[in-house]
């Protein structure tokens, strides 16, 4: 979990006092209301206001205007002068016509200018975390000060970095925790608008909403713009499944709504390209796509109709690979990824500490002398390299063996030997 709320937020979207201030027109919001009521007939003005994300007074004024146009009708009186609303026959026809253009009926979008401002004020490059923040971010991993001193400048700069080294040493785990060092949460819009298109940004599958207590702390006495959601800084990981198409705006022909690409959803956080070099595209194709964004911190995307959209490119971009970076890209590309960090095998002392930590974490008791037995028989004598993942994986094998045989969770030399045989049977 991020230490959200421990530092003042750099960006706080306040509720707009007018549609002009919201960057919206009456027609755009009326269209949202009509499409909303088509899917949720009988909704109260207060519920419509909450789900569209605009102030009650604004929504009720527009609802009464639509009632005057005979597009909506009152269905019932609610509390505090509110009403339930439904579409008239003409309103249903109008809503269906609007759906032909797009079916979006969620939170009202924010303008591109408002989105650009939010990214600028919440940029990872502004955070400048120090060594204590890094220690806290990686506290659940065994990370020495030497490695933290190498990670620190990359996190502080918020620029691209390369993790490389043998598999199983935690490159992915390190990258996933780098975002924690930034601490403060960020506001993300549910959607933005550009050239008549709605582009969805907030993705509940990728973004984690901040604790409600943090939201209240951030809000203070001011009413916040409900078109934004306070989230932990995103950490988005893509792997071998990544394609060039995922780096562009996607368009759903059925809904008529656009979806932001992964790098845009990762703005203000970390974008991890895991297993770099194993994508269906070549490494050169991927880096060619990002060479300008990495240098200028600006990306250029195409919206339906062919218009070009300039958007901020503000994730901490992390490449992780088990391959030799020099075999993937040339020196010109490597220069554009300023931080190259080798994640090496653990030494014996670290390996011992990992066994001890995993024993506690997994509640598996270690017999006296078990570590020395494992080390000598299965690593030193067999010249098998140690990896950071092996203590966890082997003790999990032991735990599962004990569960199956109805034994207390205890790592004996015999059970460790059996776990090693199972784990390393084909490697």
Image (tube, rainbow, N blue to C red):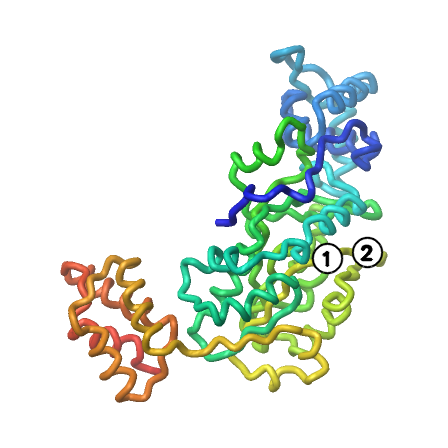
Residue 419 coordinates in the image, percent (x, y) = 24, 73
Identify the mark at residue 309; answer none if there is no mark. Answer: 2
- Local crowd size for mark 2, using a 10 Å CA cut-off: few (<14), some (14–19), many (≥20): some
User: Measured along the vertical axis of the image, is residue 304 above or below residue 63?
Assistant: below
Residue 423 coordinates in the image, percent (x, y) = 30, 75
Residue at the image position 46 percent from the left and 68 percent from the top: 145
Identify the element where label 1 is drawn: loop
Identify the mark at residue 361; answer none if there is no mark. Answer: none
User: Measured along the vertical axis of the image, is residue 192 above or below residue 131?
Assistant: above
2 and 1 marks in contact (CB < 8 Å): yes
Residue 362 coordinates in the image, percent (x, y) = 28, 59
Of pointers 2 and 1, the one earlier in the residue sequence: 1
Number of numbered markers: 2
218 or 234, which lies in front? 218
User: Measured along the vertical axis of the image, is residue 306 above or below residue 61?
Assistant: below
The C terminus appears in which quarter of the rendering? bottom left
Q: Using residue 401 as the reference point, say whether residue 204 is left or right of it.
A: right
Identify the element where label 2 is drawn: strand
343 or 104, which lies in front? 343
Residue topped by disc 1: 249
User: Measured along the vertical axis of the image, is residue 336 above or below residue 63?
Assistant: below
Question: Is residue 26 at least partly visible in the picture?
Answer: yes
Using the rendered view, name the quadrant where residue 334 is placed: bottom right
Using the rendered view, name the quadrant where residue 77 is placed: top right
Q: Using residue 291 as the reference point, say whether residue 205 is left or right of it.
A: left
Q: Which numbered mark, 2 or 1, is in the foreground of this view? A: 2
Residue at the image position 57 percent from the left and 65 percent from the top: 152
Estimate the spatial distance between the alpha carbons at disc 2 and disc 1, rounded to whole Å: 10 Å
Residue 219 coordinates in the image, percent (x, y) = 62, 32
Question: Is residue 256 at least partly visible in the picture?
Answer: no
């Amino acid at each position: 979990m991020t230490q959200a709320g421990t530092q003042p937020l750099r960006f706080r979207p306040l509720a707009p006092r007018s549609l002009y201030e919201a960057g919206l027109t009456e027609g755009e919001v009326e269209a949202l209301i009509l499409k909303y009521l088509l899917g949720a007939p009988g909704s109260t003005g207060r519920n419509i206001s909450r789900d569209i994300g605009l102030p009650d007074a604004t929504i009720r004024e527009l609802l009464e205007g639509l009632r005057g146009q005979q597009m909506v009708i009152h269905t019932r009186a609610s509390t505090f002068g509110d009403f339930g609303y439904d579409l008239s026959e003409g309103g249903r026809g109008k809503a269906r016509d609007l759906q032909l253009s797009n079916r979006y009926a969620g939170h009202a979008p924010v303008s591109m200018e408002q989105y650009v401002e939010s990214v600028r004020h919440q940029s990872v490059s502004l955070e400048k975390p120090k060594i204590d923040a890094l220690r806290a971010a990686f506290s659940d991993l065994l990370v020495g000060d030497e490695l933290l001193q190498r990670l620190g400048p990359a996190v502080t700069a918020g620029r691209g970095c390369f993790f490389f080294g043998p598999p199983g040493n935690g490159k992915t785990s390190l990258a996933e925790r780098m975002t924690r060092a930034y601490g403060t949460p960020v506001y993300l819009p549910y959607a933005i608008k550009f050239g008549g298109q709605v582009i969805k940004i907030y993705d509940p599958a990728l973004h984690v909403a901040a604790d409600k207590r943090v939201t209240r702390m951030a809000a203070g006495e001011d009413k916040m713009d409900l078109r934004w959601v306070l989230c932990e800084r995103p950490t988005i990981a893509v792997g071998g499944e990544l394609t060039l198409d995922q780096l562009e705006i996607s368009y759903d022909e059925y809904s008529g709504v656009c979806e932001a690409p992964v790098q845009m959803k990762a703005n203000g956080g970390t974008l991890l390209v895991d297993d770099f070099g194993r994508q269906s595209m070549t490494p050169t194709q991927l880096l060619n796509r990002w060479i300008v964004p990495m240098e200028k911190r600006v990306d250029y995307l195409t919206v339906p109709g062919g218009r070009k959209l300039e958007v901020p490119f503000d994730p901490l971009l992390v490449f992780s690979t088990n391959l030799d970076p020099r075999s993937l890209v040339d020196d010109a590309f490597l220069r554009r990824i300023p931080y190259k960090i080798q994640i090496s095998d653990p030494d014996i002392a670290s390996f011992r500490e990992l066994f001890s930590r995993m024993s506690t974490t997994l509640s598996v008791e270690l017999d006296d002398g078990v570590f020395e037995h494992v080390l000598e028989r299965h690593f030193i004598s067999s010249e098998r390299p140690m990896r950071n993942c092996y203590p966890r994986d082997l003790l999990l094998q032991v735990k599962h063996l004990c569960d199956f045989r109805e034994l207390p969770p205890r790592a004996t030399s015999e059970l460790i030997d059996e776990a090693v045989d199972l784990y390393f049977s084909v490697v």
